[in-house]
Every structure is written in C-alpha cells, then in structure tokens.
Image (cartoon, helix red, strand yellow):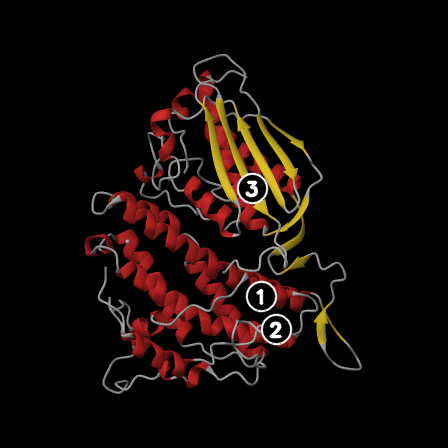
Amino acid sequence: MGCNRMSSSIAMLGTSGVCDASMHAQATRDDARSSVFGRHCALGTHQPFPDQQTKSFKETKPCRESELYKDPDAHSKPDSRKETEPSFYSEEVDRFAALDQQPVTLHHLLETCAPPLTRSKLLANAQFLACERPVRYAKRVKLFQRLPYIVNLNPHIHNVYQAYYANFIESQGFSRVENMEDEHKFISMLARQSKLLLDIMPQIARGFYECRHYFRPDDRRRFLDQLIKMRIGLRLLTSQHIALYDQFHAKTTVSAPTKHAVLADPTHRHQGIIDNQLHVTDMVHICAQSVQAMCDMTFGDSPSFIVDGQTDVVFRYIPSHLDYMLTELLKNAFCASLKSVQDTENEIPPVIITVSKGDSRVAIRVRDQGGGIPSQIHDQVFDYSFTTTKHTSFDDPDNVVPSDGSNCVADANVISGLGFGLPMTKIYAEYFGGMLNIVSLEGYGCDAFLELPSIKLNRTPTIQI
C-alpha cells in the first residue's frame, strides 16, 4: 500500500529509546541494624538469606519493636505523616537508607512460591515484604537527594520524589502482618502505592529532558540505570505477592481433616507473576498486533509481520517483562518500516520475528527493512532521552502515558518520542541475565537480538532482586 498519505505523520517517527552529605558512621549503621530486624523474615519454609538461622514466621521479631521506628523527640516534633510537603532531609529516611537491602535471590523467590501455596507461606512473604519496602523506598529517596539541587527543583522530578517519600512514610508505619486481616490491609496498601507510581517514568523522562544541561550524561545514565533497576526489583516483589494473594483466594479449597487451605491448581502453570509455560509465539502475536493497531491509529497504515523459526517454544518467564521488551522492539521496527517508504509508492516491507531456543535460553530476532541506523548516531541508541523523532512527546504538556511496561501492552498511546524505550528494554533484558543487541545495516535495515534465560531454580542461583 502506498504511503504518501502518511508523510505529515511520519516526521514523528524515531528511536524510542546522579552528592549528598555522608550517611551515619559504620558503627551507627551496625547499631541500627542490630536493633531493627526482625527484618530477616522467613520466606516460606526455606532459609531466606545466607549465614542466618531459619526462623519460623512466629519467631520473627516484629519490626515495630525496632528502635528504628522510635523517635526520642516524638513529643516535640510534628507527625511527619501529616505533612503535605515532605522535608527534603529526614532522619527516618537516613536510618532506613543506612540499612542493607536483603539479598533476595530469584532462587529464593522461586522456592517460596513453589506449590503448595499455604497461608503460612503467604503471611511469611507478606511480613518480609512489609519489612523490606521502607528500606528500599528510603534508598530511592536518597538517590533523588543526591541529584543536583536545581534538578530536584524541576516540578516533574519533584513530583516523583514526593511520591516515593509518601510511599516510604506509609510503608515504614506498616511493620506487622500477623494474620489474614493484616494481610488484606497490606494488600490494599500495595495496590494503592503501585497505582501512585504507575506513570512516573514519563515524568522522569520529561524532567530529565528539561534538566539535561545541568549535569553530565554519564551522571544522568548512572542515576537512571540505578533508579530503574531498583524500581524493577521492588515492583517484581510487590507484583509477585499481590498475584500470590489473588491466586490463594481465587483457587483455595479447605481440607476437611486439617482445615488447611492450599492452592488448588493441579497444573501449577502460574506461580505469582511467573508463567511456567509461556508460549513465545503467542506473546509475539499479541504484541505485534497491538503495535499494528498503534500504527493504524497514528499513521493510517502499518506493516505486516511474519513469525518464523521454532514457533512452538515454551519457557518460564514473566509475561509482563517479555511483553514490554517485545513491544518496544516492534515499535522501532514498525516505525522504521513505515518511514522507509514515505513519499514513495512502494509497499511497506514486512517485519520478520524469528524465535529459537537453545539449551536454557530463548532468542528472539526482530528484523526490519527500514533503512538501518545512521552510523553517526548508532552509538547513541541506548542513551536516555535520545530520539530521532522531530516532534517528541515533550512538546505536548498533556501527553503523559505509561512507559515502563506496567500495562499489559506498554505505551498503548504513544508510538515514539520519549527516548526511553531501548535503554529500558536493555535493562529489563539484562535483569535476569539476558541481553539485547542491535545490528544495523545502514541503508537496508536492523536486526534486534533479544536473548533471555529460562527462569529456573538451578539456573538462576545468584540473580538478586
């Protein structure tokens, strides 16, 4: 189909694509940690962390008893939770941020989620998460405080900072999950906090674009890499627990002799958000059809696509992560294909997606004939905020859409322009030990190679979340 009618729209196409005062002295951090937890809450019946004795859920010291939650000046200071505007520096944040994140490996997470899912496992996992979230939020707040002050004055970045600070305050006040009533309240808090942070990446993208002259690209990249990795980790733990909670209540039966609720799922296909039998070709079709719909709505036309290779590949992975990565790669390929025929009568070349599986890894190649990447900008395609789109999403102050894969189909309302797509896809791919490579034949097209490991207990012992 000819593409002359798309000329005015095609100009929008392009590649979609960090010091504060020192913390407490080491002795102070050690004292704080020794008084705190109780944080080493048991994950199921397995020893959650190395070099520590396994404790049952009931034996775990309540986080609320920790000195970390006690403020000697509580009678003379206003309740910080009632403040509408957080103080930029906070002793509570400093105390939590001085603690180490618990080294939760993917191996431990999978062991905890292994069937049968019981009430005691669910509560133990909730208690662990209730103790871990304020530490992780505090570290994220400190990350923002290390930015140049003028950057934190940016309204978009400051809005994100306030959201993280608010979640920290609420999380550090919720330190016990002892029964299912506590669990219901905890789940409500998790859902509310997740919704508050759902659309922060467009704000981050806009804020850093506006502040790009105030600090070096390397500092910006380090900050964003760290922020996104921390975000993926906490969202993974949170989403996993919410999914386990839903599965426990949706598919439970009561054994008459024991009155013990267990998960009634004989296939055990899903363990929380992990799909044990994820069909790659099905996901490819879903993502490609979604991107086609985006192109049709935006430009009035879209390329066709072909799926070949080992089309029956099944592996164990997180569907929402694969969905995000495939959607970003397909958006680039579809846009390039459309751009390659603008102002011509040529047919739009198809996008070819090839799937293969090795011993323990799945590979997906997305090939387009969109003209390739110019050599002078090839090294910039993984840079944040880099885009070849002439009219970016930043030009419209009301154009704020999710861009972190949090929806079933990422970026359903935007086809390009934020410049965060490829760098975030690379982080998602590398999070569980995968990789993303882009090979360009300038003047012809691009091959994007996505390689992902199957999530297995014996294959992912050291990957930390």
Q: Whole-Å distance between the Cαs marked 3 and 2?
A: 31 Å
Q: Earlier in the sequence, mark 3 or mark 1?
A: 1
Residue drawn at point x = 28 percent, y = 86 percent: 72
Instruction: Classify mark 3: residues with Cα within 10 Å, few (<14), some (14-19) or many (20+).
Output: many
Residue that mark 1 sits on: 108
Q: Is residue 350 left or right of residue 134?
A: right
Report, in whole angstroms, how far the alpha carbon at label 3 lies from the one at label 1: 23 Å
| Residue at the top extreme of this rendering | 345
Residue 130: x and y in percent read 48, 73
Which residue is denoted by mark 3 in the rendering?
A: 451
Residue indicated by mark 2: 46
Tell me if label 1 and label 2 are in contact, CB under 8 Å: yes
Q: Quadrant of residue 9?
A: top left
Q: Is residue 125 above or below residue 409?
A: below
- For marks 3 and 2 on the same chain, the one whose residue lies earlier in the sequence: 2
Query: Which secondary structure lies at badge 2?
Result: loop
In this rendering, position of residue 260 left or right of residue 423: right
| Left or right placement of residue 284 versus residue 337 in this view | right
The quarter of the picture where residue 260 lies is: bottom right
Q: Position of residue 202 (x, y in %)?
A: 37, 47
Residue located 20% across and 56% down the image:
149
> How many marks on residues?
3
- Foreground residue among 261 and 55: 55
| Residue 4 vertical position relative to residue 259 in the rendered view, above or below | above
